Amino acid sequence: MVFSSLLPVVGLDVSKATLAVCYQLDHQVRHLEVSNDKAGFAQLLQVCGVQSLFVMEATGTYYLALAYHLHEQGGQVAVLNPLVIRRFIQMHLGKSKTDRKDAQWLLRYGQQQAITPWHPAESVLVECRQLEQVSEQLLKQKTMVSNSLETLQRQPVISPLAQQRLEQTWQLLDDQVQALEAESLTLLETRFCQEMQLLRSIPGIGRKTAGLLLLFAGGFTRLDNYRQIIAKAGLSPREYTSGTSVRGKVRIMKMGGSLIRGKLFRCSFAAIKFNKTCKALYDRLVAKGKNGKVALIAVCNKLLKQAFAIVKSGVPYQAYFASKLTLKA
């Protein structure tokens, strides 16, 4: 689904405090600056009207309140990857950069390109992502405390009080991380009970990984094929060859999804033991002389393919499953 080009387009450059607005009135480009708050949103809608296509970039968390408000009011919203707009500007040889200019480029992009609509994620997914973000921050603090504790223990004279406080802090952080993970999994199992069971039927994927996959894939509700989730996880192969120019070996993209990549890589060790299809894939690649790590990355891809197929079909993992397409061939 894409937005109709008949809608008037509004380009919005979002910053922490302000919104740079670019729109057309009587075929003339107009600019407006409003505050990034409810009062500014109301002023924006008063000037541009609700029946518009509002185009903005995903700038941290600053765009979220605006996007939610416009969507709730019935406006059409498009949230773009900043890299897409950057390449669009470069393609048109844009040079100067200001908030007004960026808003005008967003206006032009919305007028010239087919755009996929933005819809807010389910509240349970938003809440779980917030829990995940806090958990990641606590894990970083936990690592810092662990490093401080190790440094302290290597010193010739150790303060018992300093060691005690560091150990207490580490335990407190660990308890908080465990509590956050448990709460997130409970929320996901309540909302996606069937999907969690389906994912856990895959040998190599446990409860935590199943929850992380559901959170990462947004419940698998907006994915059309398995290639989308593989690309989102940064596991798509990247090759650069042009004429006689060859830049290194084929490697994965590693763009986004670092947490799920790490989790899947750890799961791949169990998958090559207990997952029949993954084991066959791994053995075949190693037999061809592929590096063990490369073969494990292929297993990660296979796990994502299985996860997508199983959730979409609603059929649990079957070790001896044969595709109908294969049987027809």
Image (cartoon, rainbow, N blue to C red):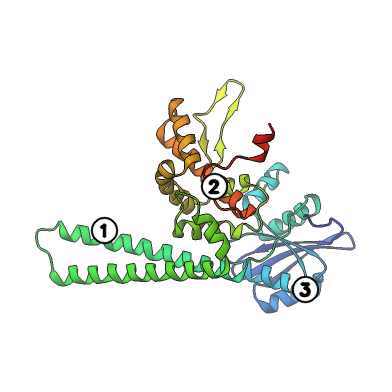
Screen quadrant of the N terminus: bottom right
How crowded is the residue under tag 2: few (<14 C-alpha within 10 Å), some, or many (20+)?
some
Q: Secondary structure at mark 1?
A: helix
Which residue was labeled with disc 3? 45
Give me the disc on residue 147: 1
Alpha-carbon distance for marks 2 and 1? 44 Å
Residue 188 can be seen, yes or no: yes
Q: Nearer the viewer, mark 3 or mark 1?
A: 1
How crowded is the residue under tag 3: few (<14 C-alpha within 10 Å), some, or many (20+)?
some
Q: Secondary structure at mark 3?
A: helix
How crowded is the residue under tag 1: few (<14 C-alpha within 10 Å), some, or many (20+)?
few
Q: Secondary structure at mark 2?
A: loop
| Residue at 21%, 58% in the rendered image | 150
Q: Are marks 2 and 1 in contact (CB under 8 Å)?
A: no
Q: Say which label, 3 or 1, has the lower sequence index.
A: 3
Which residue was labeled with disc 2? 318
Three-letter amino acid code of the residue under disc 1: Asn
